Image (cartoon, rainbow, N blue to C red):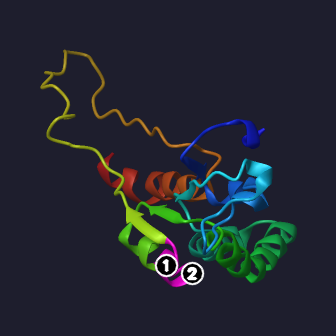
Amino acid sequence: RLAHRDFDLLQVQQLHMAQYLPRQAERSRSHERSKNLGGRVFSTILDVDNLWSKLLPRQAAILRETRLTHRLQTALDLRKVPGYERRALQRFDGLLAISEQEAGMLARLAPQARLCQAPNGVDSAYFSPAEVMPQENQPGGQILFVGTMSYLPNIDAVQNFSAQILPRWA
């Protein structure tokens, strides 16, 4: 289907989606694309919001108290991921990182790619809460977590916050 589209940029979101980048769209020294893609020249960019080689050691530490099968799978992933990341990242013309740490890791893994760092964040001055006075008989100190709970670092963070930090406020 890509052969019948006219585009200048193909953006892939997240490292695990890199496997779907057609071989014909891969980075090329001459930047000439295959006839399968209409011979058009376009750029490919990967938006890397997490490097697995950075997350898996933390996941291994979190999983140390879970089932043996989870620990074994994480240990196997720890061995395979660095090579996969390096090969996948080298297929793209450009890489987008969120943190300075990830930008440094990306630069080492794919030195040929153009790298851009776009920090993640919120303008807290603009998006500050309005001053609201608590009503009588209204509970105070409410906390809302808006992260996904299928993401292991978020699960770890909420569990740690609930066990270690929240009791200090009660």
Q: Residue at x 72, y 75 (%)?
A: 81
Q: Locate residue 110: give its quadrant.
A: bottom right
Q: Which secondary structure, mark 2? A: helix
- Label 1: few (<14), some (14–19) or many (≥20) C-alpha neighbours in 10 Å: some
Q: Nearer the viewer, residue 99 or 43?
A: 43
Q: Nearer the viewer, residue 35 or 150?
A: 35
- Magenta span: 105-113
Q: Nearer the viewer, residue 20 or 141?
A: 20
Quadrant in which the N terminus is drawn: top right
> Is residue 166 highlighted in magenta?
no
Rendering coords of residue 167 (x, y %) = 39, 52
**In the rendered image, which residue does mark 2 sit on?**
109
Rendering coords of residue 146 (x, y %) = 46, 38
Whether residue 166 is situated above or below residue 92 in the rendered picture: above
Residue type for callout 1: Met
Q: Nearer the viewer, residue 28 or 50?
A: 28
| 2 vs 1, front mark | 2
Whether residue 90 is situated above or below residue 128 in the rendered picture: below
In this rendering, position of residue 123 left or right of residue 114: left
Q: Residue at x 15, y 22 (%)?
A: 132
**In the rendered image, which residue does mark 1 sit on?**
105
Rendering coords of residue 128 (x, y %) = 18, 34
Rendering coords of residue 150 (x, y %) = 65, 46
Q: Residue at x 82, y 71 (%)?
A: 73
In this rendering, position of residue 27 left or right of residue 24: left
Q: Residue at x 33, y 55 (%)?
A: 168
Q: Locate residue 126: give its quadrant.
A: top left
Residue type for callout 2: Leu
Query: Is disc 2 in contact with disc 1, using a CB cutoff of under 8 Å?
Result: yes
Compute the Cα span from label 2 to label 1: 6 Å
